[in-house]
Image (cartoon, helix red, strand yellow):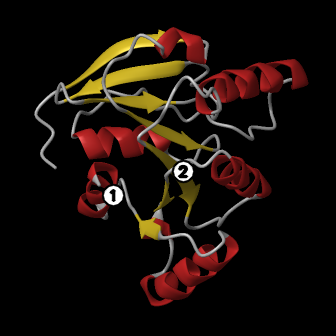
Amino acid sequence: MNVTSAQFIKGVTTGDDVLDLQLPQVAFIGRSNVGKSSTINTLTKVKGLAKTSSFPGRTRQINVFLINNKFNLIDLPGYGYAKVSKVERAKIEEVINSYLFNPAIPQKKVVLIIDAFVGPTDSDLEMLDALLEHKKDVIILANKIDKVKKSTQQTALAKIKETLHGQTVIPFSAEEKKGMGDVWEEILK
């Protein structure tokens, strides 16, 4: 897909704040520091659209972007960051759940980003299970594939796929811009 326009619409703190959106929604979720913002910037070809940071857990709200005036890309906070208080972690979880699991908010797709080098964490598996339990149409993106040695990438991807209940896994690299076409193809299905 050729992204001709991408703009920030608003940042909100509950799922109810996106009930007014009329266009289809594609949500991006992943653990803190998985490269979610870099992935969004790479896919949209707009540097700085989603704010990147070396500090995990920077995104604490739901960010809404309008893509090609055709759909809304939803950037959710990262989950699983251990270096915040339990209260803060609970708030982030509440923000995520108020959006993802609100039956009044149908997502066209949910892009679950995992770290190809680290592999699926317990938090990733919990998120996938919750998404599947709620009948979400999930795309799994294995980000940072460039960090995995080329000679072991296929083995690493096979192991990830096996761990993730046999779901299709798209290898992706924001750094090398690898997998962009495959991700857009799945989003547009």
Residue 112 circle label: 2
Q: Can you give x and y, in whole percent of width and height, for residue 85 in the image?
A: 86, 23
The image's mark for residue 186 is 1
Name above or below for residue 103 compared with residue 82. above
The reply, left or right, for residue 154 in relation to residue 129 is left
Q: Nearer the viewer, residue 176 or 12?
A: 12
- Residue 139 lies left or right of residue 136; in this view the side is left
Secondary structure of the residue carrying tag 2 is strand
Q: Nearest the camera: 18 or 43? A: 18
**Residue at the (21%, 40%) spot, across then down:** 45
The tag earlier along the polypeptide, 2 or 1, is 2
The quadrant the C terminus occupies is: bottom left
**Residue 109 falls left or right of residue 122:** left
Q: In the image, residue 164 lies at what x, y percent?
A: 65, 69
For badge 1, the amino acid type reads: Glu
Within 10 Å of the Cα at label 1, are there few (<14), some (14-19), or many (20+) other Cα atoms?
some
Q: Which mark is residue 33?
A: none
User: Which residue appears at 55% of the width and 36% of the height?
Assistant: 54
Report whether 162 appears left or right of 69.
right
Dots 2, 1 in contact, CB < 8 A: no
Question: Distance of mark 2 from mark 1, alpha carbons?
Answer: 12 Å
Q: Secondary structure at mark 1?
A: helix
Q: Position of residue 177 (x, y in %)?
A: 28, 58
How many numbered callouts?
2
